[in-house]
Every structure is written in structure tokens, then in C-alpha cells.
Image (tube, rainbow, N blue to C red):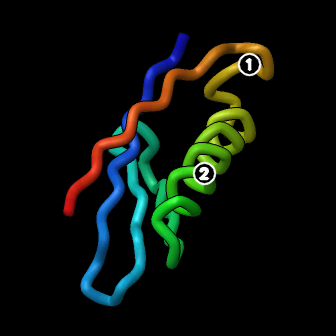
Amino acid sequence: MRHITITIEHLPENVYLATSEDLPGFTVEAEDREEIFKLSQTLALDFLKLDGEVAQDEQVSIEFEVKE
């Protein structure tokens, strides 16, 4: 099982930014708090699979760290 942490920050420009030290180059922005969680999780899994980091059937554990 692969474990990654996604950091969510609410920026002064009133957007949410998701990044991950476990996925270099991974950056996602959204205007809605709920959307950033869903979108970043989906895109992180796609990012890993397209990069060949995980097999299609491998489980990935995603943890969120929120910075306000």
C-alpha cells in the first residue's frame, strides 16, 4: 500500500491550493473547500497511475493536512 499526504491551504486570493511532498510537481487549485478535497484525491491517484508509480489495482492511502 502506498501512503501520500496532501496539504490543503486556503490562500488570500480566496482559492484552495493542494500540494504534496510525496508527489513532486503536484499542484491543484479550486475555489470550493469540498471540491479541493475531491479533486486533489482523484488527480493524485491519476497522477500516480499515469506516472507508473502504482499498479492499477494497488491501494493508495491518502491523508489530508489542512493549513489555515
Q: Which residue has dot 2 on it?
A: 38
**Badge 1 amino acid:** Ala
Please report whichever mark, 1 or 2, sits nearer to the chain's N-terminal start.
Answer: 2
Q: Secondary structure at mark 2?
A: helix
Q: Which residue has dot 1 on it?
A: 55
Q: Residue at x 33, y 89 (%)?
A: 13
Q: Residue at x 49, y 54 (%)?
A: 26
Identify the residue at the far right of this view: 56
Identify the residue at the far top of this view: 1
Q: Position of residue 4 (x, y in %)?
A: 43, 30
Tell me the quadrant of the picture where the N terminus can be found. Answer: top right
**Badge 2 amino acid:** Lys
Q: Nearer the viewer, mark 1 or mark 2?
A: 2
Q: From what the image shows, is residue 49 above or below residue 18?
A: above
**Left or right for 51, reference 65:** right
Q: From what the image shows, is residue 44 above or below residue 60?
A: below
Distance from label 1 to label 2 (Cα)? 21 Å
Q: Secondary structure at mark 1?
A: loop
46 or 9, which is in the foreground?
A: 9
**Left or right for 67, reference 63:** left
